[in-house]
Image: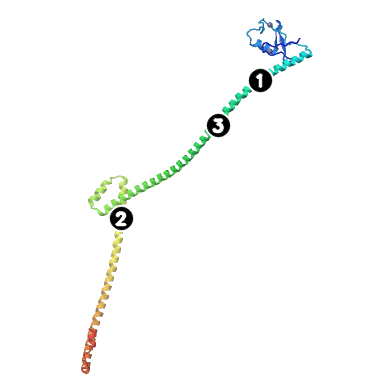
Amino acid sequence: MPIRALCTICSDFFDHSRDVAAIHCGHTFHSHCLIQWFETAPSRTCPQCRIQVGKRTIINKLYFDLAQEEENVLDAEFLKNELDNTRALLSQKEKEKRDSQLIIDSLRDTLDERNATVESLQRALDKAEMLCSALKKQMKYLEQQQDEAKQAREEARRLRSKMKNMERIELLLQSQRPEVEEMIRDMGVGQSAVEQLAVFCVSLKKEYENLKEARKASGELADKLKKDLFSSRSKLQTVCSELDQAKLELRSSQKDLQSADKEIAPSSCGDGGPEASPASLWR
Ligand SMILES: [Zn+2]
Ligand SMILES: [Zn+2]
């Protein structure tokens, strides 16, 4: 009679793949299952009848001499166990696969989100870089402007001080003594006042030199003009005397002409109307 026994710990049928152990109360279990049971149970008792179990009262391995049919049955039990185990394993694996798929899907979603974020960040970065370069250009331009403004300010300051000097020098050249004294009083007594006075002295000296040069040139011009005047006068005198001489000669020539007319006139009296005398052409 075939025995289809099972281990009440794991509910699997006995087969030839796992050892079967027995306790002295007569109950049988998988050897492996029984060892686990004793390890986890609070006291060493039979899982089925709760009898106290000593270490030596366990038979660790039972040997079954199986008939041919019985072996086939056992093979069938074994196969059924295997099938159940495999099914359980399969369903567990399928569940794991579903879980994994869910995780993969969520990871893909996350990846897509991250990619979108990266793209948007890249765009923002590009924009920021463009802005940055534009701002750099603007800053460079402004720095240039600032430099130019600084130079212009410097130039204006220089020109103002120069103009002030010029105004003072003009005052020195054109005003009366009290005004000049007041100006020098206003300048104070410091080093800058001394320098200012030195500038004024040099300027006045230069002006004096210029005036001296101008006076010398004027003197030379006057001399030259005097000489010209003198030579012109002497020329005039010469011309006048020549003119007088010429007048005298003219008068004597006229007298000669008149006397010649008189000599010619009696012989040509009867020849008709009076003719213009040659002397009248000279008057
Ligand atoms: Zn078992
Ligand atoms: Zn028992």
User: Which residue corresponds to the image point at 25% horizontal and 54% vertical from the top-left?
Assistant: 174
Nearest the viewer among 192 and 152 is 152
x then y, percent, for residue 237:
25, 76
- Whether pointer 2 and pointer 1 mark residues with C-beta atoms closer than 8 Å, the reply is no
The residue located at (26%, 78%) in the rendering is 239
Instruction: Kindly tell me whether residue 252 is visible in this rendering.
Output: no
Disc 2 target residue:
205
Q: Along the polypeptide, which appears first: circle 2 or circle 1?
A: 1
Question: Which is more N-terminal, label 1 or label 3?
Answer: 1
Q: Is residue 239 left or right of residue 131?
A: left
Q: What residue is shown with label 1?
A: 89
Name the element at disc 1. helix
Q: Quadrant of residue 108?
A: top right
Q: Is residue 179 visible?
A: yes
**Residue at image mark 3:** 112
Q: Is residue 76 left or right of residue 110?
A: right
- 251 displayed left or right of 21: left
The amino acid type found where label 3 is placed reads Asp
User: Is 175 located above or below residue 143 in the figure?
Assistant: below
Mark 2 or mark 1, which is nearer to you? 1
Asked whether mark 2 and ligand 1 are closer than 8 Å, the reply comes as no
Q: Is residue 279 above or below residue 93?
A: below
Quadrant in which the N terminus is drawn? top right
> Amino acid under label 2?
Lys
Q: Give coordinates of residue 120: x percent, y percent.
A: 51, 35
Which element is circle 3 on? Answer: helix
Above or below 239: residue 145: above
Q: Earlier in the sequence, mark 3 or mark 2?
A: 3
- Percent across and percent down for residue 187 are 28, 46
